[in-house]
Image (tube, grey):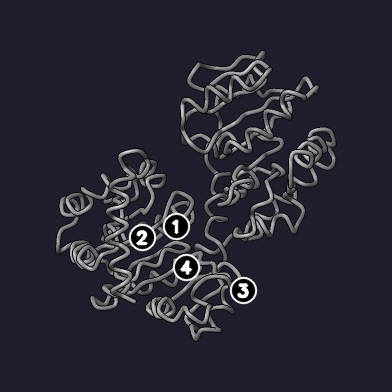
Amino acid sequence: MNFLYDIGIFLLRGTLGLLALFNEKINLFLTGRKSTFEQLENKIEQGDLTLWFHCASLGEFEQGRPVIEALSSRNPQHKIVVTFFSPSGYEIQKNYAFADAVVYLPLDTKKNAKKFLEIVHPSLAVFVKYEFWPNLLREMKTQGVPAYLISGIFREDQIFFKPYGGWMRKLLHGFSHFFVQNMQSLSLLESIGIRQATLSGDTRFDRVYSLLEQNNDLTFLEDLTAGRTTIVAGSTWPKDEELLTGFINECKLDEVVFIIAPHQMDPERFGKLKKSINKKSMLYSEGVPNRDVKVFIIDTIGLLTKIYSYADVSYVGGGFDREGVHNVLEPAVFGAPVLIGPVYDKYQEALDLVERKGCLVAEDAGSFEKKLSILLKDLQFREKTGDICRRFISENTGATQIIVDYLDQRI
């Protein structure tokens, strides 16, 4: 099985090399990794003490961030290394202030795994939510590097829990400890003989709760949103935008403003989105919106969490895409009721918020129009739903403290 895996990685590398000629994201994925070892060698010396954190992408980074910053604060003598698998995480956080080195994780070959660990020589490694790389985990065991998984979540349909999943189950047994989000994950791990696990919850609750303490003022939104019902649609994909534009074009409510922040930065798509709207619309890059603007499109990154603080109603995109809905916690912490699409079953926080009735689910265009209309027109219902969201966040904080107290004793 190991041999077949190594062959698969070799073939993947060749395939990606061809695809990179036509796909910018894949090109970033490959070219960014070319400088990983050079960057590490420039920033990490053999005598350094280091802590290593791995995140698949930006969402996992936000989960890991409270733990990274707390451990960094408690252990200033250690250098912090953060790795990403995806360009969408690395490109946004490559200058992260709490890390001494931020790099792409090398492709999972035996040679790369050995070289990476020899350069970084971490006191411990923390993986966020998932990412299980066989060669890397085996080399960590060989070199005596303890591995921990935080904010982990497991499902019955994963290969670890299938009769044919023995090879992957062995990888899990290599972890020193698991911190999981829910009882189901704890039970699934116990079913395959793993008991070094703690039900800690999700560190993202701590991360989003901290947003309330930062300055969320955006002066360019003050005039636009003052005295108006504000709908913020964040991390949207084309299907989400199709539903939104249909609703916007038919909306007869005067004192309503829509702010749309697409998930991907694509100038051509921004232009098409703007043209599809029959009301006065404007891009962020075009300047500060005045009161005539009904739809404001955010064609930049890094503002969405603050924009959510202006929301009376939020729509979180991705729920009509096969990968599923994006982060529902960011608008919820500001007490904004959440509307999403039907694909959310892999996201525990969305499942829980739907069950509590702080998050509404639109199954199709008709359902989307009906539920968004109710949220806009029924102030009492909107406020009640928003309060459910606010309480949901505050009642689920604390995972970071549990994890940091445990790890700090093992550094």
Write down the residue under mark 3. 184
- Whole-angstrom CA distance, mark 3 to mark 2, is 25 Å
Q: Answer yes or no: do the residues labelled 4 and 1 have beta carbons within 8 Å?
A: no
Q: Secondary structure at mark 4?
A: helix
Q: Secondary structure at mark 3?
A: helix
Write down the residue under mark 1. 64
Lower sequence index among marks 4 and 1: 1
Could you tell me which residue is drawn at 32 percent across and 71 percent down?
4
Lower sequence index among marks 2 and 1: 2
177 left or right of 364 in image? left
Lower sequence index among marks 1 and 3: 1
Lower sequence index among marks 4 and 3: 3
Q: Amino acid at mark 4?
A: Ile
Q: Amino acid at mark 2?
A: Phe
Number of the label disc, if any, that sits on residue 53: 2
What residue occupies the far bottom of the structure in this picture?
Answer: 193
Nearest the viewer among 247 and 123 is 247
Write down the residue under mark 4. 403
Could you tell me which residue is drawn at 40 percent across and 67 percent down?
132
Could you tell me which residue is drawn at 47 percent across and 66 percent down?
150
Q: Secondary structure at mark 1?
A: helix
Label 3, residues with CA under 10 Å away: few <14, some 14-19, many ≥20: some
Q: Answer yes or no: do the residues labelled 2 and 1 have beta carbons within 8 Å?
A: yes
Nearest the viewer among 67 and 162 is 162
Q: Amino acid at mark 3?
A: Gln
